[in-house]
Image (cartoon, rainbow, N blue to C red):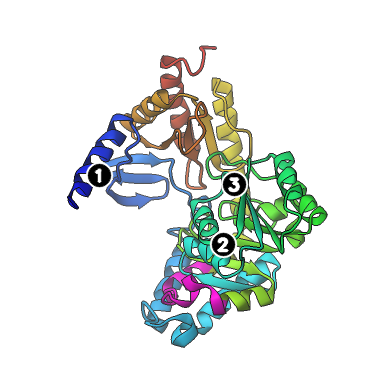
């Protein structure tokens, strides 16, 4: 009877295939700038979140190699035992100074950071208000906590305020917001969120992996862009996107908060210390992102031109200026046909359908990086236009 589980799983996987929802993993080969090898063929890669082109930057590669030479590939210990090195403390201090917060705790992954902040911080007397579009790690962290949970629609501050009014007996209120929605590049109304936090005495936690390094005058992310960096109590994020693609998570905020996490957060306490090579890579990437404004300006120009060309071709886009460009198709079947057509034209991209996005809001997601040439982006626009006309997503001018 027990082995019926495996028959059930096989049937459910077949159902995913039939619904067009099964996601294959591609075995990729050599990657050079905006080009990606799949099965021996070269593709324009529109799936990479390496917005600043730092993943293969020689300075970051050299920093990783030097860290291995100096420290070895790993520490072999937990942070609270013998796994905390000067290299870890140095990165934490750099993050704190960059985000203008008192202190930072470094985690092995974003998932650990977002899960670890809740189970050690809140209890059944507290309320957590999270928007529906938060990263899955945030939902998992919230579910593991004993706090009362409320969810509000992205951008719907009326809904958020209504829920805040209904929590008069809370010990603490936490508003958890996504700075940049990873499925369409929208930036949250952080000014409005902070105003509500002030009004209802709530703590604001911002997850900003998609914003840090890309938006804001100093690349400090969506909080800087919205002019509320000093009003955000806690910032979580990782280096997995614009900042080199290295998987390291962090929580930045009040000094006593960080000291508490380092004592009580299970993902922090019971995980082996992050590899020195990853830490060194992350620190170098943060330095480059902070100082190289020209790189960010070049990215912004590419994004603007790509959006203008797609709009000119007749496509509807989710409005914004972020390198995440969501091309709306509204139909799951059409979305898959668009993705298949692009793949046949050696363009690798992603289609998002329900339940990842709401029904009727299917889209093709294109991620623009500094590595994309004008010719690359023109080729993508032309291929999208061909299939868009064929499927009547756009009309002929």
Q: Where residue 38 sits: x, y (%)?
A: 28, 43
Q: Which of labels 3 and 2 is toward the front?
A: 2
Answer yes or no: is residue 66 visible: no
Position of residue 161 relative to residue 391, above or below, is: below
Query: Splitting the image into 4 quarters, where does residue 303 fall?
Result: top right
Residue sitting at x 57%, y 46%: 299
**Res. 298 mark:** 3
Which residue is at the far top? 396
**Residue 308, position in %: x, y?**
60, 29
Q: Residues within 10 Å of mark 3 (few under 14, many from 20)?
A: some
Tell me how far mark 1 sits from mark 2, CA to CA: 31 Å
- State which quadrant residue 174 falls in: bottom right
Q: Residue at x 43, y 81 (%)?
A: 78
Q: Nearer the viewer, mark 1 or mark 2?
A: 2
**Residue linked to disc 2:** 146
Question: What percent of the width, then of the height, locates residue 378?
Answer: 48, 31
Q: Are marks 1 and 2 in contact (CB under 8 Å)?
A: no
Q: For this view, does 42 lie left or right of residue 198?
A: left
Q: CA distance from mark 3 to mark 2?
A: 46 Å
Q: Are marks 3 and 1 in contact (CB under 8 Å)?
A: no
- Viewer-side residue, 152 vs 334: 152
Q: Earlier in the sequence, mark 1 or mark 2?
A: 1
Sequence-first disc among 3 and 1: 1
Q: Which residues are magenta?
A: 262-282
Give the CA distance from mark 3 to mark 1. Answer: 47 Å
Q: Which secondary structure, mark 1?
A: helix
């Amino acid at each position: 009877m027990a082995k019926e589980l495996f028959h059930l799983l096989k049937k459910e996987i077949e159902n995913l295939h039939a619904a067009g929802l099964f996601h294959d993993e591609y075995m990729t080969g050599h990657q050079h700038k905006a080009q990606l090898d799949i099965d021996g063929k070269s593709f324009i890669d529109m799936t990479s979140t390496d917005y600043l082109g730092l993943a293969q930057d020689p300075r970051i590669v050299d920093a990783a190699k030097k860290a291995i030479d100096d420290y070895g590939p790993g520490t072999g210990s937990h942070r609270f035992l013998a796994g905390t090195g000067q290299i870890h403390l140095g990165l934490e201090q750099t993050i704190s100074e960059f985000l203008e917060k008192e202190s930072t705790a470094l985690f092995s992954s974003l998932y650990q950071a977002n899960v670890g902040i809740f189970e050690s911080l809140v209890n059944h007397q507290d309320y957590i208000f999270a928007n529906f579009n938060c990263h899955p790690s945030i939902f998992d962290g919230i579910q593991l906590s004993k706090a009362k949970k409320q969810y509000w629609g992205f951008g719907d501050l009326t809904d958020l305020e209504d829920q805040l009014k209904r929590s008069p007996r809370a010990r603490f209120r936490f508003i958890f917001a996504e700075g940049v929605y990873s499925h369409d590049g929208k930036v949250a109304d952080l000014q409005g969120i902070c105003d509500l936090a002030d009004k209802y005495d709530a703590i604001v936690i911002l997850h900003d992996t998609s914003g840090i390094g890309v938006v804001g005058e100093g690349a400090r992310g969506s909080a800087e862009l919205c002019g509320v960096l000093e009003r955000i109590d806690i910032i979580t994020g990782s280096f997995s996107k614009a900042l080199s693609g290295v998987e390291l998570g962090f929580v930045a905020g009040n000094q006593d908060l960080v000291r508490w996490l380092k004592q009580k957060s299970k993902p922090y306490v019971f995980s082996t210390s992050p590899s020195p090579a990853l830490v060194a890579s992350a620190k170098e990437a943060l330095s480059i992102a902070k100082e190289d404004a020209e790189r960010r300006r070049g990215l912004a120009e590419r994004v603007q031109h790509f959006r203008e060309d797609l709009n000119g071709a007749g496509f509807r886009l989710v409005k914004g200026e972020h390198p995440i460009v969501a091309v709306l198709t509204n139909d799951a079947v059409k979305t898959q046909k668009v993705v298949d057509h692009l793949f046949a034209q050696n363009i690798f991209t992603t289609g998002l359908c329900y339940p990842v996005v709401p029904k009727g809001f299917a889209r093709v997601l294109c991620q623009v990086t500094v590595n994309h040439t004008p010719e690359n982006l023109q080729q993508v626009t032309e291929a999208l236009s061909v299939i868009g006309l064929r499927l009547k997503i756009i009309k002929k001018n």
